[in-house]
Image (cartoon, rainbow, N blue to C red):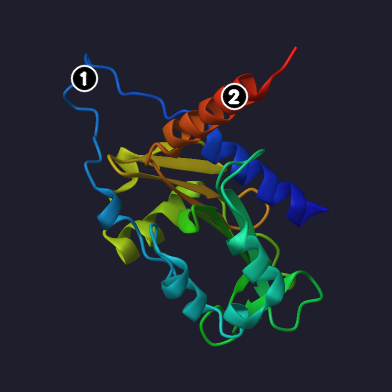
Amino acid sequence: MTRILFVSLFTATLTMTALSQTQNQPENTPVCNLSLSQAPVIRGIRLGMKPDEWLKLFPGSAQDEKIKAILDKPPTYPRYGVKDITFFPSNSQNGFNYLSREKFSGIDSVSLTLFDNQIIGISISYAPYPDIGNPWDDAAQLITIFSETFNLPQVSAWNKTVDRAVLKCAGFELILNVSDRPSAHLNSLFDFRQIIRQRIEADKQKGRAAFKP
């Protein structure tokens, strides 16, 4: 149930319209100008990947008939091309168990949000610490690690609270959480919603054209 809520919250985050930056922003306010191509690549997963690229990261997934069915679903009502796939460790009893121990050690789940089968969102839940509890006192501790690993702006560029930190860049948004266990949510700022609106309007026009009183 927790994982279902986790994926649902992540999908809801992706469907929200990104807040625009104000023109009268103070000069000393940090601005992240990193593009989509400069977004973090986490365990080999990057935004914009197509199926022939990301399926290779999860050995055996390309032969899974349920995954094939998800990818073959046309971009029609009700989600118009948005899809979600969550991967779990190979020893898990949940869903698609294609996270290898070598590549995804320390990770509890990887959720991909797709639009027309390309990755527009990556959500990673890291494994808990059963023997030591939660080692994170502040989200800034996680920011430091992500910034050093992926060449991202330092703490001052992030909008943060104790448990949550958000980095909004020109091409992507990265959200880190440390309230229970660490998690990372990487979202493309590509406006796929505009394409969805066009598809919805096309369906409405078809429906009106087919109507007979």
Dot placed on the residue nearer the N-terminal end, 2 or 1 = 1
Q: Residues within 10 Å of mark 1 (few under 14, many from 20)?
A: few
Disc 2 or disc 1, which is closer to the eye? 2
Residue 14 horizontal/vertical position (percent): 53, 40
Which label was assigned to residue 204?
2
Q: Which quarter of the picture shows residue 53?
A: bottom left
- Judging from the image, what secondary structure is the residue with disc 1 in? loop
Residue plotted at (56% across, 51% down): 137
In the image: residue 1, left or right of residue 109: right
Q: Name the kind of residue labelled 2 in the image.
A: Lys
Residue 178 horizontal/vertical position (percent): 58, 51
Please identify the quadrant where the C terminus is shown: top right
Residue 35 horizontal/vertical position (percent): 25, 48
Q: Name the kind of residue labelled 1 in the image.
A: Pro
Residue 135 horizontal/vertical position (percent): 60, 61
Residue plotted at (29% across, 50% down): 36
Which residue is tagged 1? Answer: 26
Q: Which quarter of the picture shows residue 52?
A: bottom left
